[in-house]
Amino acid sequence: MQSFAEIKRIAEERKGGAKALESILGDDNLQADISQLTDDRILSEFSKRVFQAGFNWSVVEKKWDGFETAFHRFDIGRNAMMFDDDFDAHLKNTAIIRHAKKILSVRDNAIFLSDLAKEHGSAAKFFHEWPSSDLIGLWDVMKKRGSRLGGVTGQYALRFLGKDSFILSRGVGAALARAGVVDGPTTSKIAQRKIQDAFNAWQDETGESYTRMSRILAMSVDS
């Protein structure tokens, strides 16, 4: 397996040097203290990434104020109690994207987050305290207990919430294959365990955040 120092050197060469790479990376401004979020903001972020999956992200962004209004600012209790009349109103609302299964995912993820709040004090506390050294375990919880949060949808949601995390994008997958971590798809549990182990080893090697390492990996390959 390649050292992370070698991976970073390749990224630096591709981006015009060490200073240029650092300028692109910035100060990890995507990381934040999730524990300070209210659970409605987590539901909002989950919902945004679900609606963006397989769709033009910018269209969803432009409509997001309409989503916030339609779903009552993503109030957990209100959306967990989505009744048939509410669902029908959403399907007629041109201010949002009228995708029935994704609309229902708002209700199901509200229930998921409500359950986490009962179990841990708040959903925000649960996500904040889960260690980044076991991100694949967190992905598994989200896939099994949440709605439409499997694959990169849940991974992007965590990243944009501010969780220190890696994303198995196409570029990161290619870099992991070149580094000798995997020799095929990154979707199997065996492959993802190898990937988590590699990130943990690189974190021990460098002290870098999982977010920065993920971004550096992506920048070390052609995109």
Image: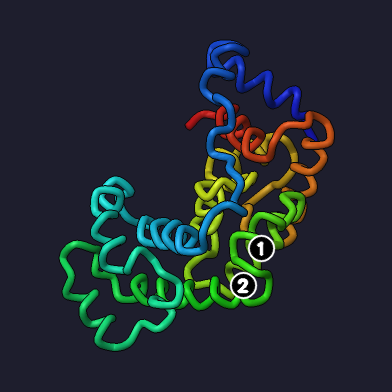
Q: Nearer the viewer, residue 168 or 159?
A: 159
Q: Amino acid at mark 1?
A: Phe
Residue 39, image x, y percentages = 51, 63
Furthest residue in direction bottom, as rendered: 84
Relative to 220, does residue 186 appear above or below in the rendering? below
Mark 2 Cα within 10 Å, few/some/many (few <14, many 20+)?
Answer: some
Residue 214, image x, y percentages = 62, 38
Residue 208, image x, y percentages = 72, 32
Q: Is residue 206 left or right of residue 80?
A: right
Contact between labelled residues 1 and 2, with CB atoms less than 8 Å apart: yes
Residue at (30, 76) in percent of width and height:
100
Answer with the quarter of the image where residue 79 lies.
Answer: bottom left
Instruction: Give the residue at mark 1.
Output: 126
Helix, strand or loop under label 1: helix
Helix, strand or loop under label 2: helix
Q: Nearer the viewer, residue 16 or 84?
A: 84
Residue at (76, 50) in percent of width and height:
133
Mark 1 Cα within 10 Å, few/some/many (few <14, many 20+)?
Answer: some
Q: CA distance from mark 2 to mark 1?
A: 7 Å
Give residue 50's mark.
none
Give residue 116's mark.
2
Residue 169, image x, y percentages = 54, 45
Q: Amino acid at mark 2?
A: Leu
Q: Nearer the viewer, residue 117 or 207?
A: 117
Residue at (30, 49) in percent of width and height:
61
Decide which of tag 2 and tag 1 comes sooner along the chain.
Answer: 2
Residue at (51, 65) in percent of width and height:
149
Q: How is the image coloured?
A: rainbow
Relative to 67, does residue 208 appear above or below in the rendering? above
Count of numbered labels shown in the rendering:
2
